[in-house]
Image: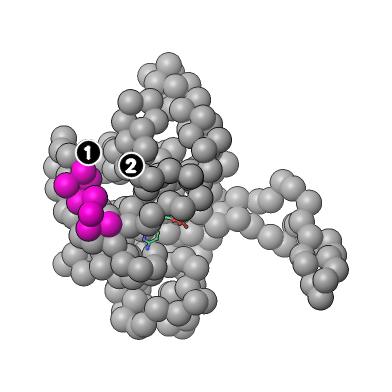
Amino acid sequence: MKRYAIIAAGGSGSRMDSAIPKQFLAVNGKAILWHSVNAFAEAFDNITIIVVVPAAHEAQARQICNGFRDVVFTHGGVSRFQSVKNGLQHVKEPSIVFIHDAVRCLVTKDLLARCYRQAEEKGSAIPAVAVNDSLRVNEDGSHKVINRDNIVIIQTPQVFRSEIILPAFAVDDDPRFTDEATVVEASGGTVHLVEGEYTNLKITRPFDLQIAAAVLNERSALK
Ligand code: C5P
């Protein structure tokens, strides 16, 4: 089946203490955005990669993605929802649509294949991993422990059949939309979880860059 990957790289990355949005920072000699696009390009033939970037960074993104075929560019919006909605305008045929944080550049072929298979079968695949830390919730100036066995951490790619994700996004933005799964649920759809990966790190803070570099080094040593 035809595949699209929307790579959400439209954010400004304010938590990284860097003037450059984090998706443009380099890890092991290549931009984080390059590593993310490369993961999809290596995993699938017949995939159109839609890169959503801030308008001011389009030229830079085009340069980074120069060696890849079938890549299109569009501009980010004020929220991640708006950025993804702009990306979805480029989905032109019945397909499986991956929506991925550009800053999760350690995504593996295995995870992409698992998500693809499940989305084809069930309509959606939302990667999740169990929590290892103890958790507490702040409540009325106090706090109490919550049962971590009931909690999962949600990752990307969030993957859907196009006939599910396209109509779900035909709405205005809402503060409840923290990811694509919440948008699909608001439209009345059910979303299906799939096993995520602990290495599928969301690069957020400077220390994450060191972890990403170490993981990529180890993988290239194994090749
Ligand atoms: O800001 P946060 O870390 O949650 O962003 C997750 C991903 O969504 C990043 O890759 C970021 O570039 C993207 N994003 C976007 N458009 C926005 C905000 C975030 O594409 N307006």
Picture residue at 33% right of the left edge, 26% below the top: 29
Mark toward the start of the polypeptide (1 vs 2)? 2
Amino acid type, mark 2: Phe
Q: Which residue is mark 2?
A: 24
Percent of width and height locating residue 42: 28, 36
Main structural element of the magenta stretch: helix, strand or loop? Answer: helix
> Which stretch is magenta?
54-61
Which quadrant of the figure shows ligand 1?
Answer: bottom left
- Depth check: give the residue in front, 116 or 59: 59
Q: Which residue is mark 1?
A: 64
Name the side, left or right, on which 184 lies relative to 87.
right
Residue 111, compared with residue 7, is above or below; it is above
Mark 2 lies on a secondary structure that is helix
Q: Quadrant of the N terminus?
A: bottom left
Amino acid type, mark 1: Ile
Residue 131, compared with residue 36, is above or below; it is below
Kindly indicate whether the residue at mark 2 contacts the one at mark 1 (C-beta within 8 angstroms): yes
Q: Is residue 17 visible?
A: yes
Name the side, left or right, on which 197 lies relative to 122.
right
Coloring applied to the structure: one colour
Q: CA distance from mark 1 to mark 2?
A: 9 Å
Picture residue at 43% right of the left edge, 16% below the top: 221
**Residue 102 belongs to the span the image colors magenta:** no
